[in-house]
Image (cartoon, rainbow, N blue to C red):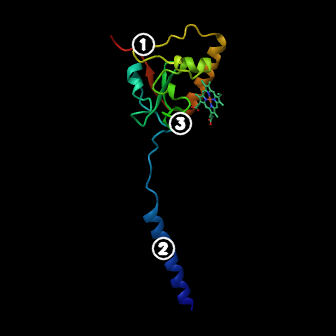
Amino acid sequence: METLVLVAIVVILATFFLGSTIFAPSRTVEINPAADDVAVEEQEFTPRTLYKYNGFDLEQIYIAVKGNVYDVSKSRQFYGPSGPYSNFAGHDASRGLAKNSFDESMVRDFGEPIDDLKDLTEAEWKALDGWEETFKSKYPKVGVLVEEKK
Ligand code: HEM
């Protein structure tokens, strides 16, 4: 009887051990680490190269805010093609964030110069700075937005 119990325990332990080894999930690599977790190599984007990351053709979705480019792919529900803020995807979202509007007129076409935001009021700059803090803490920065070389 005791032997039987012993054998049963050994079988249960062996099943457990083997099972956890065989079925253990393989280590996954974080694709979108939160900001500060990992140093992501920075790149220079022009409005034209940024446009590629508008969520239609690529998995990655990037948005520029005050000259910095953030990887917002983990919030595809906001910025993806059917999201409420898809107009910002692949664009400089600064004006829209400052003016609290996701209207199409808030973003520039990739052929146009980068928005200098010179007309923003103090309150709008404050709103934009607040949004910048959100993006900085939530998303990895992947680069900067620069003018296309002529
Ligand atoms: C119509 C009124 C609006 C409602 C009810 C609304 C509601 C929301 C909600 C529920 C979220 C998700 C928050 C979360 O789960 O983290 C969100 C996120 C966001 N909202 Fe609005 N929103 C409105 C207008 C706007 C406008 C006009 C803008 C234009 C700048 C805007 C920009 C954003 C952005 C950028 C995010 C995502 C932030 C992130 O990436 O975490 N929202 N909004």
- Image region (quadrant) for ligand 1: top right
The residue carrying mark 2 is 15
The first of marks 1 and 3 along the sequence is 3
The first of marks 2 and 3 along the sequence is 2
The residue carrying mark 1 is 112
Classify 10 Å Cα crowding around label 3: few (below 14), some (14-19), many (20 and above): few
Q: CA distance from mark 2 to mark 3?
A: 40 Å
Where residue 137 sits in the image (x, y, percent)?
58, 31
The first of marks 1 and 2 along the sequence is 2
Would residue 95 be visible to someone looking at this image? yes
For label 2, the SS is: helix
User: For the point 52% across and 32% down, which residue is it?
Assistant: 79
The residue carrying mark 3 is 75
User: For the point 62% across and 15% down, which residue is it?
Assistant: 125
For label 1, the SS is: loop
Residue at disc 3, CB closer than 8 Å to ligand 1: yes
Q: Along the line of sight, which residue is nearer the eye, 94 or 85?
A: 85
Comparing labels 2 and 3, the label whose residue is closer to the camera: 3
